[in-house]
Amino acid sequence: MAIIYHKNKDCNILAKQLAAKIGNILVEQVNKNNKASIAFSGGSTPKKMLQYLAEINNIAWEKIDITLVDERFVDESSNRSNAKMLKENLLNNIANKTNFFPLYSEGKKLDEEEIIKINQSLKTIKQPFDIIILGMGLDGHTASFFPNEKELQKAFTTEKMALALKSSDGEDRISLSLKTILSAKNLFLHIEGIKKQEILKEALKKGNIEQMPIRAILYQQKRKLNIFICES
């Protein structure tokens, strides 16, 4: 699989470069298809990139479907909510224009009925995704694919767009499946810091995918992967 590296010692510059790349793709897809779709990851790494993306004024957000790669099954009032992070850093500037599809609904339980509803909602998004942006944890997880979890193989093999998973500490999550992620037209991995660079270097060595689930992305042959690395 082709991996294209984009490196910078300045995390702000890297974030701005990634935002510009994403913006160009979204504009291109809207011009071509009158619609585009994107899934963002959570955590602290994407915040600056999202803020820069919100400042790009030629994106027709009303024609773009937005969702998350994964979500903790918590209310948006929680600081652990990826939807809250996305709304505070991107959707706050384009809230009246966006087509946002959350993975969590207030007061709902993550049971089979709710998973069915989430998948039905996701099917209304333009498919395949034009862009999916992934992150990576220090344990080598990506999306909600956590090392050695019992549902990991299901995440790797299911035909569903999304499924219920648990984090390493047992927290309920909903995540896009591996098939959905690898179907994206443009796939990005965004990481910051020396420690994550070391984890990435280790993950690129041949090894057990279940021990470092990010390898499911790094080893695949279906999609080119753009890795944006802040080296500081």
Image: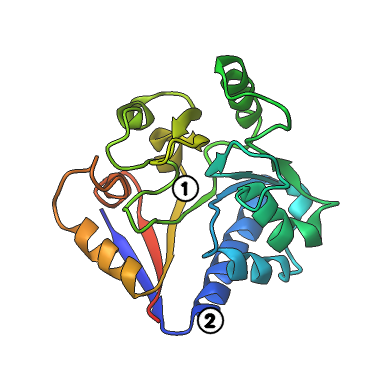
What kind of element bears circle 1? loop
Front tag of 1 and 2: 2
Question: Label 1, label 2: how many angstroms apart (C-alpha)?
Answer: 24 Å
| Marks 1 & 2, CB-CB < 8 Å contact | no
Local SS, label 2:
helix
- Circle 1 packing at 10 Å, graded few (<14), some (14-19), many (20+), is some
Going from N to C along the chain, the mark reached first, 1 or 2, is: 2
User: Quick check: 134 left or right of 147?
Assistant: right
Q: Position of residue 215 (x, y in %)?
A: 26, 49
Is residue 148 depicted above or below 1 in this figure?
Answer: above
Q: Is residue 163 above or below residue 129?
A: above
Colour style of the rendered protein structure: rainbow
Crowding at dot 2, Cα within 10 Å, few <14 / some 14-19 / many 20+, comes out as some
The mark found on residue 13 in the picture is 2
Tell me which amino acid carries mark 1. Answer: Lys
Q: How many badges with numbers are in the image?
A: 2
Say left or right for 185 vs 149: right
Q: Nearer the viewer, residue 62 or 54?
A: 54
Residue at the bottom extreme of this rendering = 9
Residue placed under numbered mark 1 in the picture: 185
The amino acid type found where label 2 is placed reads Ile
Q: Quadrant of residue 105?
A: top right
**Closer to us: 34 or 86:** 86
Q: Residue at x 65, y 53 (%)?
A: 79
Q: Residue 77 has which mark?
A: none
